[in-house]
Image (cartoon, rainbow, N blue to C red):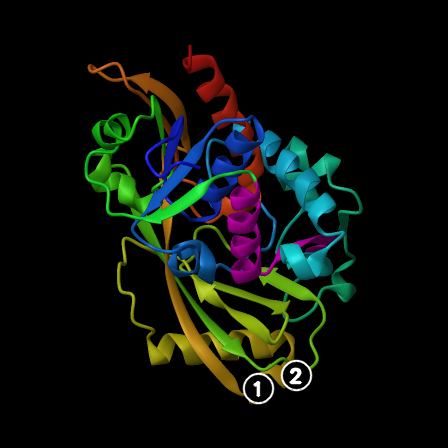
């Protein structure tokens, strides 16, 4: 692509931005992605990344977006080394099938476990085989896929997305800035939800596990990824600390070891912190025409489920962009 030519500018290079960019490029549009951070430096890169609608609204739309994304991950799992997507068995503890939305009925193999089969100190749980995404690999795959389609990713700090996109020759800009939308488009509803993780050597754990009370700041989960076991976690509202807290890390390991005791002695490889881009009023996906005639399409506020709904939301963005262009 010519360095100065684009039909659409996508701002943000996390999983939501890159997935949106790929979908738009697949429609034949010339795409540039502008991001202050490289994909591997975004919040998406530190996500545990199990497919599951977690801490995201609006419930009425999330189910369809999530199921659309589930179908795509099912296809990508055919080549896990390249895409980073694998189908892995596991258990959601403290979860009842009857308490989930209609979307759950369309997830193959999702079943209620008898209490005696639920690991750890939990009285209920669901068994499932779900996509587990190795995010550094998947983000690299998305970037490569976009490049194959002629798209470009550029490190750039954006302050006025519409004006800068128009100056670059684009007639549409797609805002996938996550928590950055708080300042970039003046959305005071955006709230950080701090997530802290511990990466350890895998002592032989092959299945994932979660116990996540949406009303609690503490969660318990572990996800086996190539070369490591990811332990979590936290969901601390309005906490923007990016440095790992040693006491929190120790508590995470202890909670996970209540389910799998061998985790207690696993060697720690690294600590990670990310800020989930929560929006209590729900994901914002809409197009607006600005006074200068530019079209601004929003796609942000995915909370802890950006990976879960990325492709469904990208399809909606592609529809909005196509409808807005002459």
Read off the residue under disc 2.
203
Is any atom of residue 6 visible in this view? yes
Residue 221 on image: x %, y %: 56, 65
Image quarter (top left, top right, bottom left or bottom right) of the N terminus: top left
Label 1 CA crowd tier, 10 Å (few <14, some 14–19, many 20+):
some
| Dot label at residue 151 | none
Q: Is residue 191 left or right of residue 146?
A: left
Image quadrant in which you'd find residue 216? bottom left
The residue located at (40%, 26%) in the rendering is 7
Q: Please state which of residues 58 and 2 is positioned toward the viewer in this rendering.
A: 2
Q: Which residues are magenta?
A: 125-148
Helix, strand or loop at disc 2?
loop
Pinpoint residue 149: horizontal percent, then vertical percent: 55, 38
State the residue in front, 4 or 54: 4
The residue at 38%/38% (across/down) is: 176
Quarter that holds the C terminus: top left
């Amino acid at each position: 692509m010519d360095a100065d030519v684009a039909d659409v500018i996508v701002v943000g290079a996390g999983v939501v931005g890159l997935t949106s960019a790929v979908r738009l490029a697949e429609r034949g549009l010339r795409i540039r992605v502008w991001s202050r951070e490289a994909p591997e430096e975004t919040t998406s890169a530190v996500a545990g990344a199990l497919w599951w609608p977690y801490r995201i609204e609006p419930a009425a739309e999330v189910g369809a977006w999530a199921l659309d994304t589930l179908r795509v991950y099912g296809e990508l799992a055919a080549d896990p080394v390249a895409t980073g997507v694998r189908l892995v068995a596991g258990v959601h503890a403290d979860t009842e099938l009857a308490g989930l939305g209609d979307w759950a009925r369309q997830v193959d193999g999702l079943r209620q476990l008898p209490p005696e089969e639920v690991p750890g100190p939990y009285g209920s749980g669901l068994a499932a085989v779900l996509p587990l995404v190795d995010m550094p690999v998947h983000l690299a795959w998305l970037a490569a896929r976009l490049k194959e389609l002629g798209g470009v990713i550029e490190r750039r700090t954006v302050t006025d997305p519409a004006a800068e996109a128009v100056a670059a020759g684009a007639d549409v800009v797609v805002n996938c800035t996550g928590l950055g939308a708080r300042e970039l488009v003046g959305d005071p509803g955006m709230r950080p939800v701090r997530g802290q993780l511990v990466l350890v050597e895998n002592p032989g754990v092959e299945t994932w596990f979660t116990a996540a009370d949406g009303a609690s700041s503490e969660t318990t989960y572990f996800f086996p990824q190539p070369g490591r076991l990811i332990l979590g976690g936290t969901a601390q509202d309005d906490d923007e600390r990016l440095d790992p807290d040693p006491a929190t890390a120790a508590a995470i390991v202890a909670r996970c070891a209540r389910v799998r005791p061998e985790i207690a002695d696993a060697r720690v490889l690294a600590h990670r912190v990310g800020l989930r881009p929560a929006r209590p009023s729900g994901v914002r996906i809409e197009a607006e025409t600005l006074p200068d005639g530019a079209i601004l399409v929003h796609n942000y506020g995915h909370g802890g489920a950006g990976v879960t709904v990325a492709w469904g939301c990208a399809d909606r963005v592609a529809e909005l962009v196509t409808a807005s262009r002459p």
